[in-house]
Image: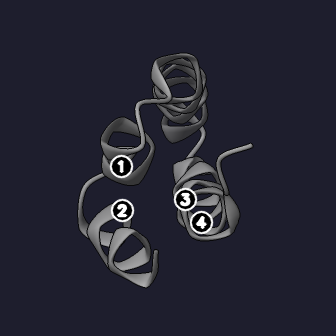
């Protein structure tokens, strides 16, 4: 699980993609694209790191 935290640190949404969460990947990419216009994309990047690290399958 902690390996995904480091993977997503370098490539946005890689952790969610490895976990098979395609909808989460789409949401993160769209929000990151929109927010990088306003130089706030780093917020989505941090959210993606935390989301990949804390997610657990049900």
Distance (Cα) linking label 3 and label 4 = 10 Å
Q: 27 and 33: which one is in front?
A: 27
Residue at the spot of label 2:
8
Q: Residue 38 appears in which quarter of the rendering?
A: top right
Q: Residue 3 placed where, x, y %? A: 33, 79
Q: State which tag comes first along the sequence, 1 or 4.
A: 1
In the drawing, does residue 3 fall left or right of residue 21? Answer: left
Give the residue displayed 36% in from the left and 62% down from the top: 8
Whether pointer 2 and pointer 1 mark residues with C-beta atoms closer than 8 Å, the reply is yes
- Return the residue at label 1: 12
Q: Quadrant of the C terminus?
A: top right
Q: Secondary structure at mark 3?
A: helix
Residue 46: mark:
4
Q: Between marks 3 and 2, how big is the CA–CA gap?
A: 7 Å
Residue at the image point whose x is 37% and y is 68% from the top: 4
- Residue 35 in the image: above or below residue 45: above
Q: Position of residue 17 (x, y in %)?
A: 35, 37
C-alpha distance separating marks 3 and 1: 10 Å
* Label 2: few (<14), some (14–19) or many (≥20) C-alpha neighbours in 10 Å: many
From the image, state whether disc 4 or disc 2 is nearer to you: 2
Q: Secondary structure at mark 1?
A: loop
The image shows residue 24 at horizontal and vertical percentages of 58, 28
């Amino acid at each position: 699980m902690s390996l995904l935290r480091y993977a997503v640190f370098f490539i946005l949404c890689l952790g969610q993609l490895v976990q098979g969460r395609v909808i989460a990947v789409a949401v993160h990419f769209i929000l990151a694209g929109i927010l990088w216009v306003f130089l706030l994309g780093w917020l989505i990047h941090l959210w993606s790191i935390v989301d990949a690290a804390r997610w657990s399958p049900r």
